[in-house]
Amino acid sequence: MRYATQVKSISHLKAKAAEVLRDLSERREPLVITQHGEAKAVLQDVASWDATQETLALLKLLALGQREVEAGEVSPIAQAVERIRARDP
């Protein structure tokens, strides 16, 4: 596991929630929560979560663009610029 040092039990989370949240914000590393010795959840600070969501959105756009290229649904840049200029009054 990549974050082996960032593993805590659910009992630890319950007992020290405020401390755990403070540490998440300061370290900006995810925390794996275990229950009965098994990983059950991952906690992450909000700033890191937002950054992850932005990254995922960009990756989705890249994947969509790649699919359009593979399907031949693209046009030369000059043609695209021409269409845009034709729309602009």
Image (cartoon, rainbow, N blue to C red):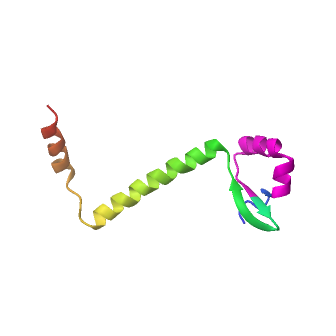
Q: Identify which residue is drawn at 72% across, 41% down.
A: 25
| Quadrant, the N terminus | bottom right
Above/below status of 18 relative to 68: above
Image quarter of residue 22: top right
Give the prevailing secondary structure in the magenta stretch.
helix
The answer to whether residue 14 is magenta is yes
- Give the side of residue 65 with respect to residue 74, left or right: right
- In this view, the residue in front, 63 or 13, is 13
| Quadrant, the C terminus | top left
Give, as a single range, the part of the protein colored magenta.
10-32
Count of marks overlaid on the render? 0
Above/below status of 66 relative to 19: below
- Give the side of residue 78 with respect to residue 17, left or right: left
Residue 34 percent coordinates (x, y): 78, 62
Residue 13 percent coordinates (x, y): 81, 51
The answer to whether residue 29 is magenta is yes
